[in-house]
Amino acid sequence: MTAPAALIGSWVEEIDTPALLLDLNIMEQNIVRMATAFRGLTAKLRPHAKTHKTPIIAHKHLAAGAIGITCAKLGEAEIMVEGGIRDILLANQIVGTRKISRLVSLARHADLIVAVDDGANVQDLSQAAQAAGVSLRVLVEVDVGMRRCGVVPGEPALSLAQQVEKAPGLKFAGLMGYEGHLVFVPSLEERVHRVHTDLQLLIDTVSFLESRGLPVGIVSAGGTGTALITGRLPRVTEIQAGSYVFMDGRYKTIEGVDCECALTLLTTVVSRPRPDRVIIDAGMKTLTHEFGLPRFKGRDDLELLGLSEEHGTVKLNDPSVALTPGSTLEIVPSHGDTTLNIHDFYYGIRRGRVEAIWPIAARGKSR
């Protein structure tokens, strides 16, 4: 599905709904704000593309000083490479014959880094890289409390790193640890304390590997809620934060993340069955709500009560408010990453008009 190019130059109110809007000024300010915050730090930004899934936005990060791009899935990385992005960290384990074949094929066209936490996977990557005549940089993922992927800190990480170092076609590049379990800790003071405690496991593992004669070049970590904490830790070299580029309703509830919400959903009132209720044309097929129900932009007098497949039910705190069928509203998604993944394109808005229409090129690229 493509948006009509004729809409470029139109006012926001002329866009058919539901439609995903991207405030270009706010997005660009968010990119500059985070890039500025990292100037002078040892750690550099490698922003996560899973938030925006769009090569042109990745290029904006690089133009602001990012050293590369992070991807969650191989399909995302393929789209980024097609869009001209060269330096990519796949912060995930790539397993299975089909995916590994795609990975080594992609490595002919880009400088890839891939995460591992399993010895058999290391062997498979090595064999495929040798057969394809390519070299892959590899990070050993360490579990720092997320309880998802990653080896145990210390000796298990050393053992796997040594296996990578000896594997033909692979180059041990460093360690990765994701403190995603801490990014939404509401209190900044508590978040700082817990990041320092949990990431010490990663930092101690760096020291342990180097004491055994294995240099650790890259130490990758960080999310939007922890970026400016983790980015100041000793030995951390790269931060994978991504959500700051758009922000969302969930991130705006935590202390110490100063970026603004650039992403909204434009929706239309389709019914006003009661003085204190309106129905909008946005439901679960256009908004996700695993982080709670979204809120309306600039409208404290409205409360979203619930979502069905194609509709949203809205409470009006003041029944005298003039909302009728045809009125438009903007909603700030509670979780931007999953909301944009169910849309085909963004309407890039500047000063109330459509400046650009960008396909969400890596939308649905979950393989």
Image: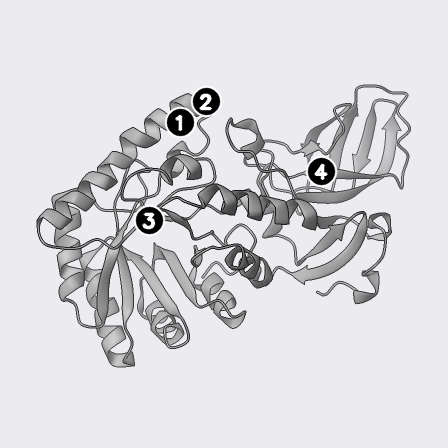
The quarter of the image holding the N terminus is: bottom right
Q: Residue furthest left?
A: 212
* Classed neighbour count for the residue bearing mark 3: other residues with Cα under 10 Å, few (<14), some (14–19), many (≥20): many
Marks 3/4: CA distance? 36 Å
Asked which quadrant contains residue 318, the reply is top right
Where residue 73 sits: x, y (%)? 43, 58
Q: Which mark is residue 331?
A: 4
* Classed neighbour count for the residue bearing mark 2: other residues with Cα under 10 Å, few (<14), some (14–19), many (≥20): few
Residue at 56% across, 34% down: 258
Where residue 224 sits: x, y (%)? 47, 40
Report helix, strand or loop for mark 3.
loop
Of circles 3 and 4, which is in front?
A: 3
Q: Which residue is mark 1?
A: 191
N-terminal label among 4 and 1: 1
* Position above or below: 261 against 192: below
Report helix, strand or loop for mark 1.
helix
Q: Amino acid at mark 2?
A: Ser
Q: Amino acid at mark 4?
A: Ile
* Position above or below: 262 against 257: below
Q: Which residue is mark 3?
A: 237
Q: Amino acid at mark 1?
A: Arg
N-terminal label among 1 and 3: 1
N-terminal label among 3 and 4: 3
Label 4 close to label 1 by CB (< 8 Å): no
Marks 2/3: CA distance? 25 Å
Report helix, strand or loop for mark 2.
loop
Of circles 2 and 3, which is in front?
A: 3
Q: Which residue is mark 2?
A: 187
Label 1 close to label 2 by CB (< 8 Å): yes
N-terminal label among 2 and 3: 2
